[in-house]
Image: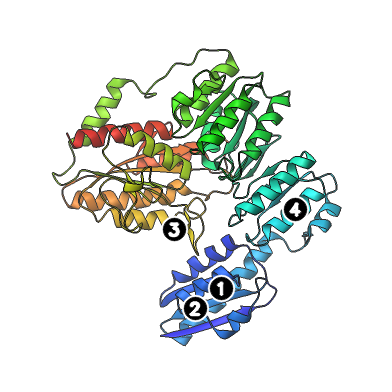
Amino acid sequence: MAKRVKIKENNYYDSVTLMSIAKDIKSQEGIKEVVVVMATPHNKELLENVGLLTSEVEEATPKDMVIGIEADSEAEIAKALTATEEALVAKRSSDGDEKYRPRTLDSAINTLPEANLALISVPGNYAPKEAKKALKKGLHVMLFSDNVSVEAEVELKELAAEKGLLMMGPDCGTAIINNKPLAFANVVNEGDIGLVAASGTGAQEITVIIDSKGAGVSQVIGTGGRDLSVEVGGLEMSKGLKALAADKQTQVIVLVSKPPAPEVAKKVLTEVEQIDKPVIVNFLGGKQELFTDSKAIYSSNLEEAALKAVALSKGEEYQFQEFSLDEEKIEEIVNQELSKYSSEQQYLRALYTGGTLCDEAMLILAEELESIYSNIPLKEEWALVDNGVSQQHTALDLGEDEFTQGRPHPMIDPLTRTERLAQEAEDEEVAVLLADVVLGYGSHADPAGELAKAIKSAQQKAAARGGHLTAILSVCGTEADPQNMAEQVEKLEQAGAIVMPSNAQAARLATRIVKEINN
């Protein structure tokens, strides 16, 4: 076995590019490990964990790039190193070296003086400084970076409030400002429904359902996932709510969040009382009793929030439907699936790329099933003993840190999920797979295509044992998205998957099948 580490000083590439290149090189014959990273403290730990940390790497700075390779022979290392260098050159060329790329915020402002918003995505230890600099220059900020302390978040949001600016984030993955999708966002119709969201995929699911019903979106203001914590106190949601209340285009407002701190939820609902426009609130897992005597319109899930907003926008009456398909068709699907299982099959495995979509699915599943184990459990006693091993009914948010260390987010690179699906397919007791496919800017170019291949393989394994694997999915996207939603759905259906119109409906169908199996 041979190892080699090379340092390229002052040679910056974004982490997604580097991880994608490393993945491609690692697939070559004779290669055991490839790590291509910037020399940040976290990445040095990663290199140490795989035995590729050297004294030279320890001295390297975050501006330096490290290529670490372990292979069967020196010849294989030389071949892999050449391929890595060529991939880096090709990436730089495809980006267009002739295009001017500002190296500082000041030079960027000089290049585009009319800009009024900065999207910042740098390592977390540098992010607060850059965000503060942007705010002081009068720019709204969308801070994509994570690993920012809560103290820094509060300081930034208080500074933004003083200056009358938006401070979206940290860890804000989705926004649509003046019909411009930012980071992970979908191409949706312009309209009169505005969102303030402490959830990226939650915002995406609501906006694509709004789009599918012929309505549209005015603004989507992200807050970052911690905004409704006790420490942050809903600073950005309060500001976003007031901004949409003052926005002439916005006629209906939707607030969405994972379960907030109860005292912060009450604070937000009190502020809703001052708003003249209808405000729909979806605090996932939030109790309906919170809304007693409140002007806020309660919704129990993302789909319901979207449909209530559309009804208000169109001046129609909202009517609850468990499924878009009629009951007879749902029964037919359930009975067909039940007839194919072996006697050992009984459990569900949910593999999600969207954390809020995973939360929503678990809340629906938990209404009927005794327990849902998870890495983001609804109850403490439902926490997995080992996140690498599922037990009974299990739902995973594969976008959590334990699955993304040293790897791209699964919305960017499906490998984390396809590998986990292959692992789940070895379990003879698994009957149902529940999953999301998230389209739009920032996401993989063909997520359904990658997942379809993994589903087909898993179903073949189940069939070889005399059983069957039911794959139930929803696609969060629109026809205008870069991936083309119709084509994505077709690929999944051709692989034998059942594609439902929303995540909530997919979870309900999975619940019904699993409940029938265990009766």
- Which residue: 33% across, 20% down? 326
For residue 37, above or below residue 225: below
N-terminal of the pair, mark 3 or mark 2, is 2
Q: Which residue lies under the disc numbered 3? A: 403
N-terminal of the pair, mark 1 or mark 3, is 1
Give coordinates of residue 503: x percent, y percent. 42, 35
Disc 2 marks which amino acid?
Ile
Q: Which residue lies under the disc numbered 2? A: 69
- Name the residue nearer the viewer: 450 or 372: 372
Q: Decide: marks 1, 2 in contact (CB < 8 A)? A: yes
Q: Nearer the viewer, mark 1 or mark 2?
A: 2
N-terminal of the pair, mark 4 or mark 2, is 2
Q: Which residue lies under the disc numbered 4? A: 132
Disc 4 marks which amino acid?
Lys
Q: Nearer the viewer, mark 4 or mark 3?
A: 4
Residue 84: mark in rendering: 1
Q: Quadrant of the C terminus?
A: top left
Q: Quadrant of residue 27?
A: bottom left
Q: Nearer the viewer, mark 4 or mark 1?
A: 4
